[in-house]
Amino acid sequence: MKKLRRGMVLILTKDFLIFACLVLLVSSPVYSQSSVHGAIQGKVTSEDGQPLPGAEVIISSPKLIGGPQSVITDIEGKFRFIGLPPGTYTVEAKLQGFTPQKRVNIRLIVAATLTVDFTLKVGKLEEEVEVIATAPIIDVKDTQIHAYNMPKEFMEKIPASRDFEDQLTFAPGAKGAWGSFYGSPDSLENKYLTDGLNTTCPEDGAPAQLVDYDSIEEFNVMGIAAPAEYGGFGGALINVVTKSGGNDLSGLFTFFTRRPSWHSENWTDYPYLARRVFSEFYNVHFNLGGPVIKDKLWFYTSGRYTFDQDHIQDQGKGEKSWGWRGMVKFTWQLNSNNRLQATFDGYTRGRKGWTWDFVDPSIDYPSKGHGVFFNVSYLLTFSNITFLEARFGGMDTYTLMGTTNPPARFDMETEWWTNNYFEYWKNKRQRLDFNASVTHHAEDFIKGSHDFKFGVEFARMPSHDWRGMPGNRTYYDLGGEPYFMVYQPFFDVRPIGTRLEFFLQDTWSISDRVTVNPGVRFMHVRGDLPRSFDEPPFRPKLGIAPRLGINFDILGDHSTVLKLHYGRYYHQYRDLMYTPWEPKGPYQEYLWGPVLEEWEGLPPGTYGKKWVLDFEDPWEPYKIDPNLRFPYMRQFVVGIERELGKDISISASFIYRTNHDLMDRVNISGKWKPVQWVDPYEGNTYTVYQRLNPGENSFYITNPYKGQGKDIGAAYPDIVAWDPERSNRTLEIRFNKRYSNRWQFRASFLTGYSWGNDDNFWGEYGSSHSTGLGASWNFSNPNYQINAEGPLTISSTYIFKSAGSYDIPVIDVTVGFDFRYESGDRYTKQILLDPDIDPDPVADWWTRDVVILAEKRGSHRLPAMKNFNLRAEKYFHWGQVKVGVLLDIFNVFNWDTVTWVETYYDPWSEYQFGYVWDIQNPRAFKLGFRFEF
């Protein structure tokens, strides 16, 4: 916390001066939705279509602190309400001489502008109000394709793991365990917002604030055709809104559990699986919210305890973990124009053991961590056409995994880890974020009306990582006897990242049916390593991201809209883009003396029983391209949304994404020559590259392009043989029946294709075919370029998802389900290159051999994954108290789809290409209790 406060002081001094200059620009008046609010607008007319100025329009909602709001329509009969929290609204219009009219059950989500029109009939004001139950559900102003909104009504009724990250997988387009969207790298290109504040982990782009499941008001997955207000992602934008209390006191207590025996077995066809694991867990949550002062000050507080214990068949207990989390939130309506909100969230967690294939379960791999998050936001409404939003918040987290000693041992014959886990990692993550925006509506300005929005975002992200092998080394045995050892000192790095962005966007309503959304976003990023560099070494050029969207209300009744969009989106910022540039010690490989004697045919005792240095790769400083550019994604979208009836909509979209200026490292000192090689596995002949100077590696950080090796004087001129490429094209159809009349249903179908030579599967820095964590090995060694182009690993050929629920009347039982069918991931046969040809993998220490793709990328595909989950919940009522008892059944049909196989031909291993490593989890049961009032 001391460092967090110190970081705040730094923001208020040196770095904040830049931000302050831009805030002056924001202060000038420049109406639209925001990342935590929505808007409702419309027009009041008579039956003959004439506008009705002077009509009173009243809006109300349980979520609207301060009570109902009212406005008077202007000379054109128009009205608008801005800065509205998400929720269900009622809007009423009345005027002397006309029958009042009311529209109910209007569901507003964040970042949406709904158009609610009224046609008043001649009559008396005293007459009974005409109620219209049909509510608009399509935003005809915003080019962004309908966000996948999961409100609490959905989250409470659908079977789910109650895990924050797993909730992502409900969204159309999400693929993989951590959410690859439309070809993006697995989990690394998403941006996470909590109540409008960036809570993405600065180190690798993962979600840092894993909000308690029962404290979420709504979970939104966005990003298709997003306006200039949003940036910093190449996958999806995840926007979470937390609960806020209300005028009525309410509370919730939940308890969920799964006992060790509450599962089936689905591994009959795979009895040789390395681990057959099933989980026991307990999850307890409570929350309480309500008024401190009605319509003035609300509070919300929650707490959670979790306990998980893995059980390994025939081996006993595995990993055990536990955690506490608590949150408190206040919403204060100071007066009709000013609203203040503050949230504090914290956790602590621990773990013992490690359930992982081929790790001795007796190894104690301890882990502990804690973290705090805070978010203070302010809403100032100048009028019904202009308002300002500002937020300040941050995070401070700490994690410790493993022990510094003793060194780990790995037996290459049994592939079994003993003595210790192979990694120790201690880290601190901090963020301080500030964002502010002003929105202003201008009527009859340059042909039509405009909703201008200008905003600024600033972040400062200091971190500390201390990571490496226990004891600085790892021993490799063969049949229990010493063979070789790798050595490298711990890596200690303390990066400080800063990001300054500002945007300008407009929603230009040229007519009642045509809206144009132009915008531009600017990004300035710096990454500092102050212990080793006098100035930040990561200094990419200023990023400029234009956006343009066009909406056409086809029928003119707000029921059908055609949307066209083009935009540039800079990728997520990650420390790992530059932290490997911090100087570190050499990488060394030692052979056991008797092994070396056998290799060289020398008499026993020549070297003796000691470690002999066999290979060394000294660390060389990175050279940085002075014209380095930040990578970005270019997106083209054509979509149509159609309202089919009350609370029912359908949409179809074509999405095309390409990635540009991918950042990578190029080996400028390595030398190779092409040779012919016949592999010993299948007898195929390959053109491979023989290393002429193993261990001599220095790197140039740049945006590679074909032929660049010659331009920068690389020792091997053809080191950059092609332009890095990663692209995706997708056709997506969505159907949504939002919750009303006791039921809800949503479904999506997607067919797409991801292609390139820069993969989208997880890979550490410089140690895979993916630049997802800052750099690949594609240009570190030309052998990695063999067969590198083709379908990417996470390639969504077909994805079908559906979920829904029905409240059965009379018996008061809710039945919910979740069904998914996803084509399997791609994989490619890989073989180890003869070390006599190239002994230098030019990668992290755990990569001991050069690997080549033995066939075209993506030549194989895993089986299609299908899963069906079911929930049944029975409710009991006592006055205002409701008690629920529920049962979740996961993988109802106990399917056993293979989820990963061995992709290597490895002479050291008995587990060869095609060996099944994992299948989907078996049928399992979860029991839950819910008590609420």
Image: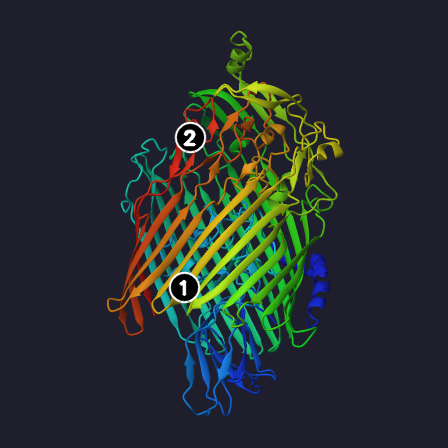
- Percent of width and height locating residue 854: 52, 27
Number of numbered discs: 2
- Residue 873 appears in which quarter of the rendering? bottom left
Image point (70%, 73%), residue name: 446
Question: Sequence-wise, which precedes: disc 2 or disc 1?
Answer: 1
In the image, residue 782 sits, relative to residue 920, either above or below, namely above
Q: In the shown orientation, is residue 648 left or right of residue 694? A: left
Amino acid beneath label 2: Gly
In the image, residue 772 sits, relative to residue 88, either above or below, namely above
In the image, residue 443 sits, relative to residue 545, either above or below, namely below
| Element carrying mark 1 | strand
- Percent of width and height locating residue 478: 45, 21
Quadrant into which the C terminus falls: bottom left
Image point (55%, 46%), residue name: 728
Which of 890 and 394 lies nearest the eye of the viewer? 890
Question: Which residue lies most toward the top here?
Answer: 603
Quadrant into which the N terminus falls: bottom right
Residue 359 appears in the figure: yes
Which of 871 and 596 lies nearest the eye of the viewer? 871
In the image, residue 101 sits, relative to residue 729, either above or below, namely below
- Percent of width and height locating residue 266: 30, 40
Q: CA distance from mark 2 to mark 1?
A: 42 Å
- Percent of width and height locating residue 747: 41, 56
Q: Which numbered dot is residue 737?
A: 1
Residue 583 appears in the figure: no
Please give the residue where the numbered disc 2 appears in the rendered image: 914
